[in-house]
């Protein structure tokens, strides 16, 4: 494990992620319009179901899987991975799938902005159930506020005020972020290729169990709630597209190097599942 920590610490890709997190969430704030949020809020049943699924059902599933796979080196990692807000790629995939774009944006935005509070709340519950895990509540909350809440709030404010420079700057940031995400999708796995290969067999069962569980629970619960097909697709994509930069940042904040490895494997496997799903028209 010490060797793994040294590899994580030496990764150039991982060193850039905590610095980029505020940029990512500032951009997300600038892309969130009050009109989209109002549109989403009009369907209270769908919105309530979607937000509860994201911030309650997914973390609970992660905690349950961590207990079922308690002997696995990644038992803590799966619990934390399912805490992460929906990924930035979810909006793009929702567009391809012809889902509910305002709902996707609103879900990602709201889960992101409340993530400092929801993350430390669930981490507290995880620490009770996993004796080997401890964290500093105040320090973690403060770090998440600085990295996520404040940049998002600033981005949302400048967009709401329609400041003249916003459109020009966000166009550049949009292209930069897409390029950055594309680059780290390749450089991260390349830099950590040896531990990814070594730990793949230990992680794959946990990842597959997570994907299947999310799919089955979401499909069953959406039928019970009776939401539209477009909303159903959107919520499923949001649930599967967890934000791997946030997971990698949490692995650094919490000093859990194996979580970075699991986060990358989880991200790559879910991409292999969600991207083809989003491209199939039905």
Image (spheres, rainbow, N blue to C red):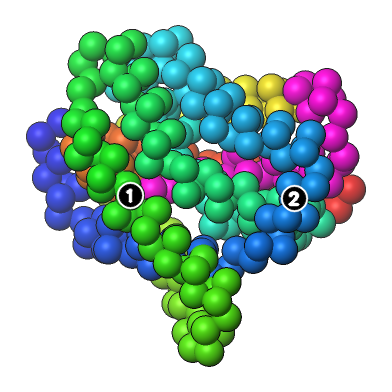
Query: On screen, 219 above or below 239?
Result: above
Task: Bin the neighbour count of mark 2 within 10 Å (Cα to Cα): few under 14, some 14-19, many 20 and up.
Answer: many
Q: Are marks 1 and 2 in contact (CB under 8 Å)?
A: no
Query: On screen, 207 above or below 261?
Result: above
Q: Quadrant of the N terminus?
A: top left
Q: Secondary structure at mark 1?
A: helix
> Would residue 242 be counted in the magenta stretch?
yes
Residue plotted at (33% across, 49% down): 145
Q: Nearer the viewer, residue 206 or 47?
A: 47
The outermost residue toward the front is 161
Q: Position of residue 59 (x, y in %)?
A: 49, 26
Quarter of the rendering containing residue 94:
bottom right
Residue plotted at (47% across, 84% down): 169
- Identify the residue position indicated by label 2 in the image: 40
Tell how many labels. 2
What are the residue bounds of the magenta stretch?
220-246
> Would residue 139 be counted in the magenta stretch?
no
Q: CA distance from mark 1 to mark 2?
A: 25 Å
Q: Nearer the viewer, residue 237 or 83?
A: 83
Residue plotted at (36% across, 18% down): 125
Query: On screen, 11 above or below 78?
Result: below
Task: Bin the neighbour count of mark 1 within 10 Å (Cα to Cα): few under 14, some 14-19, many 20 and up.
Answer: some
Q: Secondary structure at mark 2?
A: helix
Q: Position of residue 73 (x, y in %)?
A: 30, 22
Residue 12 visible somewhere in the drawing: yes
- Identify the residue position indicated by label 1 in the image: 145
């Amino acid at each position: 494990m010490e060797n793994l920590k040294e590899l994580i610490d030496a990764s150039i890709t991982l060193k850039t992620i905590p610095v980029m997190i505020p940029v990512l969430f500032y951009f997300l704030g600038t892309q969130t319009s009050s009109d989209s949020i109002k549109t989403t809020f009009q369907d209270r049943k769908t919105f309530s179901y979607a937000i509860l699924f994201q911030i309650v059902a997914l973390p609970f599933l992660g905690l349950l899987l961590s207990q079922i796979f308690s002997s696995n080196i990644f038992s803590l990692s799966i619990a934390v991975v399912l805490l992460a807000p929906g990924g930035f790629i979810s909006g793009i995939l929702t567009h391809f799938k012809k889902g509910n774009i305002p709902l996707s944006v609103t879900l990602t935005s709201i889960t992101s902005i409340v993530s400092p509070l929801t993350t430390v709340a669930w981490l507290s519950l995880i620490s009770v159930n996993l004796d080997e895990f401890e964290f500093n509540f105040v320090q973690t909350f403060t770090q998440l506020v600085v990295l996520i809440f404040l940049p998002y709030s600033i981005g949302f404010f400048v967009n709401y005020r329609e400041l003249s420079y916003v459109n020009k700057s966000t166009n550049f940031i949009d292209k930069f972020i897409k390029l950055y995400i594309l680059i780290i999708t390749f450089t991260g796995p390349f830099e950590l290729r040896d531990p990814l290969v070594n730990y793949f067999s230990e992680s794959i069962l946990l990842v597959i169990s997570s994907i299947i569980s999310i799919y089955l629970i979401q499909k069953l619960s959406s039928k019970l709630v009776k939401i539209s097909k477009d909303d159903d697709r959107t919520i499923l994509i949001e649930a599967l597209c967890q934000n791997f930069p946030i997971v990698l940042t949490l692995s650094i904040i919490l000093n859990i190097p194996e979580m970075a490895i699991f986060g990358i494997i989880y991200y790559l496997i879910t991409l292999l599942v969600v991207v083809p799903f989003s491209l199939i028209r039905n």
